[in-house]
Structure formats: structure tokens, C-alpha cells
Amino acid sequence: MYKTFHCEFLRRRKEWFLKFGKASTAMWWTSKGYIPTLEEAVEKLDYLQQNGPSQLVFDFKNKFPEPVIRK
């Protein structure tokens, strides 16, 4: 996403959107090929808004590295 034309839209988002006052985007690591449900996304966003960024869920300003899975 950061190396595509979408990046320009993210840079200019202040021109089109009002400040929400709390997190409006949540990100988290998943396994390759996994597609999260809408319910999971809402839960993650709610968690982020209530608890702030962590390794469980984070935002664009506070990214966490992909977890290392040991076998």
C-alpha cells in the first residue's frame, strides 16, 4: 500500500476528512491468506480506541513488527 498510488491519498486525507477524535483505522497481523470478518475488525477497532496501540492492534502512527512465530 505504501508503494502504490494509495499513498498519495493517505497523505492528502486531511483535505477530505474531518478529525474523528479517536482511532478510525485498526491494523493487526494475520496469517497469510486469512481474511478477517467484519465483526473481528469492529472488535479490533474498539479495542484500539479503548486501550491504545499494542502488538495486538495498532494504527498507522504506532506500527509494531510482525510477530515471530517459533515452531
Image (cartoon, helix red, strand yellow):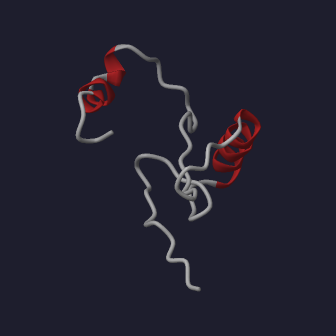
The tally of labels here is: 0
In depth, the one of 36 and 55 nearer the eye is 36
Q: Residue pushed farthest front?
A: 33
Task: Say above or below: 21 vs 61.
Answer: above
Please tell me in which quadrant of the rendered image residue 53 appears: bottom right
Residue 55 placement (x, y as % from top left): 56, 65
Residue 16 placement (x, y as % from top left): 38, 13
Residue at the image position 59 percent from the left and 86 percent from the top: 71
Relative to 13, 44 lies left or right: right
Q: Residue pushed farthest bottom?
A: 71
Task: Say above or below: 27 vs 22.
Answer: below
Residue 67 placement (x, y as % from top left): 51, 71
> Quadrant of the image for the N terminus?
top left
Residue at the image position 55 percent from the left and 31 percent from the top: 21
Please tell me in which quadrant of the rendered image residue 29 appears: bottom right
Task: Say above or below: 27 vs 16.
Answer: below
Residue 26 placement (x, y as % from top left): 56, 43
Please tell me in which quadrant of the rendered image residue 36 appears: top right
Residue at the image position 55 percent from the left and 50 percent from the top: 33
